[in-house]
Amino acid sequence: MKVKGLQIKNFTAFEESHINFCDGINIFIGANSTGKTLLLKLIYFVLKSGEDWHKNSSNHLRESELLLSYLMQIFKPDNDEIGRLIMSKKESEKSRIILSYDNSELAFEINKKDPLGVREGVIKWYKESLPKTPSCIFIPSREILSMYEGFIQAYDKRELSFDKTYYDLCKSLGAGRLKNPDPSNAEMIRVFEDILGGKVVLKGNRFYVESKEELLEAHLLAEGHRKLAMLVQLIANGSIEKDTILLWDEPEANLNPKLITEIAGALIELSSLGIQIFLTTHDYLLSGELSRYAEYPVESKTPPIRFFAFSRTGSHEPVTVQSGDTLADIKDNPILDEFAAHYDRERASFYSEFGKSQGSDA
Amino acid sequence: MNKEIVIENQKFIFGEDWTVIYYDEEKGFKKLKDTVDGTKDVDIIALDNQQRLFLMEITDLRGHGIQNREKIRTGEMVLEIAQKVRDTIPSLISANIHSPIIDKWKPFIKALINREEPIRVIFWLEEDRHIPPPQEKRRKNEKNIFMDNLKRKLKWLTSRVLVVDQGTYEKCIPEIQVYNISHDK
């Protein structure tokens, strides 16, 4: 099951957007505060709601209660004010979200206030029942292997500033490894564990990398390696498998360039196994590597790849999204713009010693 | 009087106060090249009116772009230019020692050892200009990466390294004008 598209009206920074995704890797680029992570979380919110509703169909929550609870836990608006997620200032305006996948769709409205005075009534479901959605994993930009110990218990008992994506990921990480992983997954695990220098293991309530020589606590690993170990654990325990939808916020954070190249290769591998991927990035190398795969596709190996550039003309202006099959198709690419501007500044510095300074022409 | 040099389809016009050497056949300058196999020099050696030393290498990627692009990709071209810059330094010393014109090379040697004014290295890398804006930015970025790599190879000599072409030069050193003679008549 693949996510095909998303229609958003009046949600956070999005006024009116219709976005069509590809079945392979969808890459969101854009400056800060242009809604990339929000969109990633929105997809996660919708998918996770459908997934958990069917997984826990006997639970005590009504669908709208579950949706409201997830909305609050994932987006964490101040004082649980749902109106903060709606773009328009008008009380009567609503947000409308339609996520389509394969031949089905999941559509709902969010109101600032429920006319009947029932809190969960702010979310109105279009269909009679919440449809089943594909399973999904959200990896936030920060690694959480080192904070795994005690996190789930703390989240269950106390108010924490971490959103639900961290909690859900911790739960996924805690699952035991599969006895017989798919051979392609096993190969990927082997490659990454070679880089890590050992096998990722969960002992008690802590993660380690175990080699012949030592058992190294996750806390003592470089942060980039912790991230890689996290990915290994999720593949090894089947949380990421065929038909999973993987949403990854800034995979490049704290990774060195060599690891970024490995991650780009892993994303291609994962996607070719049937995993649909959505990721945000600010990284030139990661986006460039993925664009290279798109520009030089290997038949039957390279998955579909699509780039989405998010931009807005001011901090209160709506987000616009343009898409392309390679980075070169994107007119406003802030990563490339900034690198090109760096080249301009470099030239300007050189020229400034000859009595003539030059402005940026990026 | 201005000095004009045509090289790789580019016409360089230097201001009248500049001292410019291009492919000097003088024995003194060629001595190193004749003695040590594999020695190569940069295309242009110049001094501006403030006696600042410029070493310039020019390559036109148009026409034989594929081979040169491969050389750029593998890092061979960065190394080649760095070696040319390196070899130009002893060639200048050799020229100063052996030149029949006693003072001809003195200002270059003076500029070479002047700690107040760093040596400027310019690599003119001409490419097709008529490309859409996104590719243009990408190309700028490639130049940026090339410039960083060249800087690393030349850090023993200078940090003033520029990689440029017609599209990005924009006559920003007022006393050096450059025209693309295959397009700009």
Image: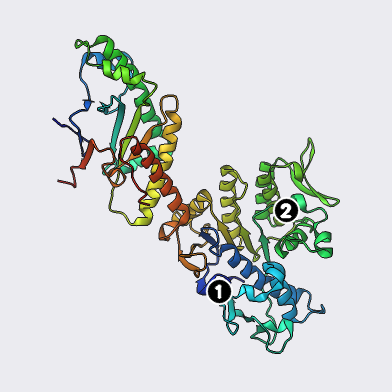
User: Residue B170, percent across and down?
Assistant: 27, 45
Q: Could you say whether the residue bearing mark 1 is in a helix, strand or loop?
A: strand
Q: Nearer the viewer, residue B152 or B83?
A: B152
**Residues at marks 2 and 1 on the same chain:** yes
Q: Nearer the viewer, residue A127 or A13?
A: A13
Instruction: State the residue at coordinates (31%, 35%).
Output: A354
Quadrant (top left, top right, bottom left, bottom right) of the N terminus of chain A: bottom right
User: Residue A234, percent across and down?
Assistant: 71, 56
User: Residue A106, percent across and down?
Assistant: 62, 79
Q: Nearer the viewer, residue B63 or B151?
A: B151
**What is the chain identity of the residue bearing mark 2?**
A
Q: Residue furthest bottom?
A: A116
Mark 1 surroundings: few (<14), some (14-19) or many (≥20) residues within 10 A: many
Q: Residue furthest right?
A: A204
Instruction: State the residue at coordinates (61%, 46%).
Output: A255
Instruction: State the residue at coordinates (31%, 28%).
Output: B55
Q: To which residue does mark 2 refer?
A: A144
Say which label, 2 or 1, has the lower sequence index. Answer: 1
Instruction: Please identify the quarter of the rendering in which residue A181 is found.
Output: bottom right
Name the kind of residue labelled 2 in the image.
Answer: Ile
**What is the chain identity of the residue bearing mark 1?**
A
Q: Work out whether A182 lies above or below B11.
A: below
Instruction: Please identify the quarter of the rendering in which residue A296 is found.
Output: bottom left
Circle on res. A84:
none
Q: Nearer the viewer, residue B7 or B105?
A: B105
Mark 2 surroundings: few (<14), some (14-19) or many (≥20) residues within 10 A: many
Q: To which residue does mark 1 refer?
A: A6
Q: Residue furthest front?
A: A355
Q: Could you say whether the residue bearing mark 2 is in a helix, strand or loop?
A: loop
Name the kind of residue labelled 1 in the image.
Answer: Leu
Applied colour scheme: rainbow
Horizontal arrangement in the rendering, residue A146 relative to residue A309 (left or right): right
